[in-house]
């Protein structure tokens, strides 16, 4: 059996020593972690929304999509509800992290317990983001009123009368 001394030396180094080494020029740097969808815009947002839609329509709903009732609403145009997009994106990221290659054997159980149940309960709550929607009928959620867009911004004194 032949032992590669370079491989042995690298395994003996601490993670911090290995991270300070530059990768060989032929290796590409590892991809960066995905960003939360609410921070994305334009083509990057569209790409992530399409990936989320494919996962939602081909994995989540066929397996976990329960019957629609007034006590558990769902909107067939869920992507038009920003809260639903945000929650489903977080659920999808957790699913990828806990069920993908390299995840531990208990990852799927943890995903079900810690992520799937709470997110689906929140989304399908009668007062949740789909509250006004019925099968075949989408209704945008009314936003709560706000007296001032930026009450503590630089223009806060404008329009205020002195007494």
Image (cartoon, grey):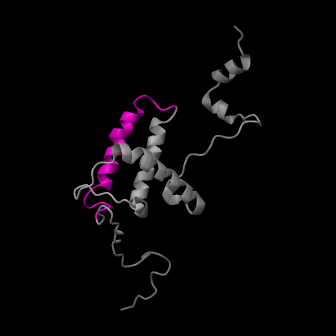
Q: Residue at 35% x, 66% y: name it.
A: 138
- As for residue 124 lying within the magenta part, the answer is yes
In this view, 25 is above or below 14:
below
Q: Quadrant of residue 70?
A: bottom left
Q: Residue at 65% x, 34% y: name it.
A: 19
- As for residue 136 lying within the magenta part, the answer is no
In this view, 96 is above or below 130:
above
| The magenta segment | 102-131
- The one nearer the camera, 145 or 66, is 66
In this view, 19 is above or below 152:
above
Q: Residue at 40% x, 63% y: name it.
A: 81
Q: Residue furthest right?
A: 25
Q: Position of residue 39 (x, y in %)?
A: 52, 59
In this view, 9 is above or below 141:
above
Q: Residue furthest top?
A: 1
Q: Position of residue 2 (x, y in %)?
A: 72, 10
Q: Residue furthest left?
A: 71
Pick the quarter of the image with the C terminus. Answer: bottom left
Number of marks in the rendered image: 0
Q: Position of residue 11 (x, y in %)?
A: 64, 22
- The one nearer the camera, 72 or 98, is 72
Q: Position of residue 56 (x, y in %)?
A: 43, 49
- Left or right: residue 117 versus residue 32 is left
Q: Residue at 67% x, 18% y: name it.
A: 8
- The one nearer the camera, 158 or 74, is 74
Pick the quarter of the image with the N terminus. Answer: top right
Q: Quadrant of residue 152?
A: bottom left
């Amino acid at each position: 059996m032949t032992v590669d001394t370079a491989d042995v030396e690298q395994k003996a180094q601490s993670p911090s020593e290995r991270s300070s080494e530059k990768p060989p020029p032929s290796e590409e740097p590892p991809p960066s972690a995905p960003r939360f969808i609410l921070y994305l815009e334009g083509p990057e947002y569209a790409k992530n929304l399409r990936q989320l839609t494919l996962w939602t329509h081909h994995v989540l709903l066929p397996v976990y999509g329960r019957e629609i009732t007034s006590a558990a609403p769902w909107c067939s145009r869920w992507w038009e509800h920003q809260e639903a997009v945000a929650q489903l994106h977080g659920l999808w990221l957790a699913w990828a992290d806990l069920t993908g290659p390299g995840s531990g054997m208990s990852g799927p159980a943890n995903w079900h317990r810690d992520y799937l149940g709470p997110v689906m309960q929140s989304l399908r709550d009668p007062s949740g983001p789909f509250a006004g929607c019925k099968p075949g009928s989408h209704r945008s959620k009314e936003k709560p009123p706000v007296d001032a867009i930026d009450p503590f911004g630089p223009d806060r004194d404008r329009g205020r009368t002195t007494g």
